[in-house]
Amino acid sequence: MSQIKYINLSDLILPEFEAHKSIPDAYTIEITESIKTIGIIEPLIVRAKDKQFEIIAGCVRYRCAKLAGLKAAPCIILKADDKAAEVIKLHENIKRIPLDHIDQGNTFVMMREKFSMTEQSISDVVGKSIAYISQHITLVSQDDDLIQSVRDNKISFSQARELMTVDDKTERRRLQHYCENEGATVEVLKTWVRNYKNSLITNPLVSDSSPSSSDHSEPQKFWRSCEACDKPVDIQHIRQVFYCPECCLAIKTAISEEKAKISKNNTNKTNSEPS
């Protein structure tokens, strides 16, 4: 059984690759206060490296211990090569603070490039499907705007996955803008993407990588009929709201009654005009 040894914080070093790029401040404060009160309950996992000890698991506890004013931390020293250390870190992160989708993608890319791991082998390690691994690797290869939008929770991973199927960058950014600002659901986005792809069959766009394409050209517009007035509206101006079935029925009934009233008034006005 591995023994616990107290190691000075000054002798501990952070790993070269950290999966978490940012930790919520509230979580850091909570852990720091806990350490001040009861200390570090679960030891850090470390390995010897260059006369010091590299942290395999417990980077957050290490940082919080420093904030709490501790001089040393309980550690378990393991003999682990680079690949084994990364696998342990990945399991640690999945268990403690779930990695966001961008951090997951970056971790999968690192494991593939540094250790020549296939998507299948990564899938076996993390317990996720091969498609899940592939989609996250693809996500972090996208443009910075899409990546940051996912990290900032402006759009969900499911929305990003749909947007990644749109090759034209101008059109993709336009749809991304709607998702961020109009609250479009994944199902609505799927409809937009499907309509866009169907439109390419009869009206193909020039690739945005083509020298003849213009960055200032007007993006193709898509229309939907307003459920109240039946007028065609550019989806850029469509507003999505959420009602329970009862309220939805009440609103539609009120609209129908108002339309009937307007129609009746117009008919009466026409009949009252001299022939």
Image (cartoon, rainbow, N blue to C red):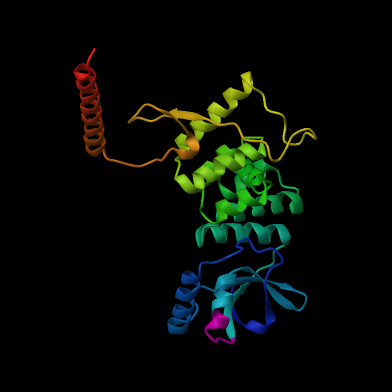
In the image, residue 167 above or below residue 154:
above
Residue 20's x, y, as percent?
A: 60, 62
Residue 68 part of the magenta segment? yes
**Placement of 26 over or under 98, stated as above or below:** below
The quarter of the rendered structure image containing the C terminus is top left
Residue at 51% across, 67% down: 24
Task: Please indicate, yes or no, whether residue 164 appears anywhere in the rendered image.
Answer: no
Where's residue 56, x and y in %?
Answer: 64, 67
Report the residue at 29% width, 41% height from top: 243
Residue positioned most to the top: 275
Quadrant hosting residue 123: top right
User: Which stretch did the figure color magenta?
Assistant: 65-71
Q: Nearer the viewer, residue 119 or 269?
A: 269
23 shown above or below 243: below
Find out whether residue 110 is within the magenta segment. Answer: no
Q: Residue 115 placed where, x, y %? A: 75, 52
For the view shown, which residue lies furthest in the right direction?
211
Left or right of 130? Residue 180 is left
Relative height, residue 161 to residue 192 (above, below): below
- Residue in the image at 49% along x and 29% along y: 223
Locate residue 243 relative to residue 215 in the image: left or right.
Answer: left
Which residue shows up at 66% across the image and 35% down it? 168
Taking the image as drawn, is residue 187 in sight? yes
